[in-house]
Amino acid sequence: MSIVEGSVKFSTKSAKETEILGFSLARSLYQPHSKFLMLRGELGAGKTTFIRGLGVGLGLGAIVQSPAHCFGNQIAA
């Protein structure tokens, strides 16, 4: 997974580690200002697993929809 412009790249070795990364980053994204997060990766790269951890970290729950075929999801936090 990589972030364009500002360039941050994360590598995880398991689904659990990917979910924990999402959960951990949720704290830095939970600010009063809107954030835009774009994930890029091959099918099966762990995008949904990351979003599941992010959702839990933001208090939205663990049930998430795969972003693989979605143009954009807006989630009110």
Image (cartoon, rainbow, N blue to C red):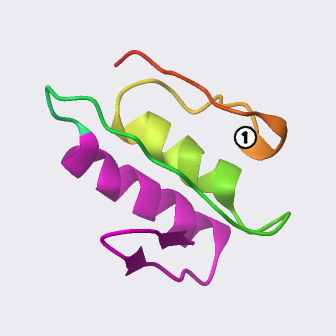
* Quadrant position of the N terminus in the picture: bottom right
Q: Is residue 13 magenta?
A: yes
Q: Please say if 46 is above or below 26.
A: below
Label 1: element kind: helix
Instruction: Identify the residue at image location x=65%, y=28%.
Output: 63
Residue at screen point 40% across, 41% down: 36
Answer with left or right where residue 32 lies relative to residue 4. left
Q: Position of residue 50 (x, y in %)?
A: 56, 55
Say above or below: 35 vs 40: above
Q: Residue at x 44, y 36 (%)?
A: 56
Which residue occupies 39% across, 51% down?
23
| Quadrant in which residue 62 is drawn | top right
The C terminus appears in which quarter of the rendering? top left
Rendered position, 75 above or below 40: above
Magenta stretch, residue numbers: 1-29
Q: Is residue 35 shown in magenta?
A: no
List the single residue furthest toward the top: 76
In this figure, which residue is indicated by the disc labeled 1? 67
